[in-house]
């Protein structure tokens, strides 16, 4: 009977440890999610940012085949 009681007690300890770690992980994920919710990824860059590629009407028109070949060549 005593051995059975110790087995149940050990099982309860493991269960409580599992629940505690799960709750800690859950609230950690919520904290990280809330932290990055306010992060504005698509704001205009500040400082000396340089535009990498522009699509203005006065540039040479690139056909879709040339664009596809450029994609395969450079791995964009």
Image (cartoon, rainbow, N blue to C red):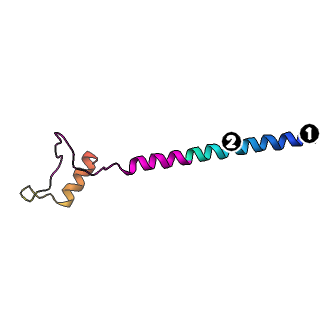
Q: In this view of the protein, which residue sits in the foreground, 32 or 61?
A: 32
Q: Tell whether 68 sits left or right of 29.
A: left
The residue range painted magenta reads 26-54
Pointer 1 or 2: first along the chain? 1
In the rendered structure, find residue 60 and report the number of the disc placed on it.
none
Residue 14 percent location from the top left of the image: 73, 42
In the rendered structure, find residue 17 and report the number of the disc placed on it.
2
Residue 10 percent location from the top left of the image: 79, 40
- Where is mark 1, residue-wise? 2
Residue 2 percent location from the top left of the image: 91, 39
**Crowdedness of circle 1 by 10 Å Cα count: few (<14), some, many (20+)?**
few
Instruction: Provide the secondary structure element on which disc 1 rests.
Output: helix
**Crowdedness of circle 2 by 10 Å Cα count: few (<14), some, many (20+)?**
few
Q: Quadrant of residue 8?
A: top right
Question: Is 34 in the magenta?
Answer: yes
Instruction: Provide the secondary structure element on which disc 2 rests.
Output: helix
Question: Is 5 in the magenta?
Answer: no
Q: Quadrant of residue 63?
A: bottom left
Q: Residue at x 19, y 55 (%)?
A: 66
Quadrant containing the N terminus in the rendered view: top right
């Amino acid at each position: 009977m005593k051995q059975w009681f110790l087995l149940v007690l050990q099982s309860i300890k493991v269960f409580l440890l599992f629940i505690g770690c799960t709750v800690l992980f859950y609230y950690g994920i919520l904290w990280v999610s809330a932290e990055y919710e306010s992060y504005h990824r698509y704001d205009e860059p500040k400082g000396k940012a340089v535009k990498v590629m522009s699509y203005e009407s006065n540039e040479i028109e690139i056909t879709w085949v040339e664009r596809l070949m450029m994609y395969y060549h450079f791995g964009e």
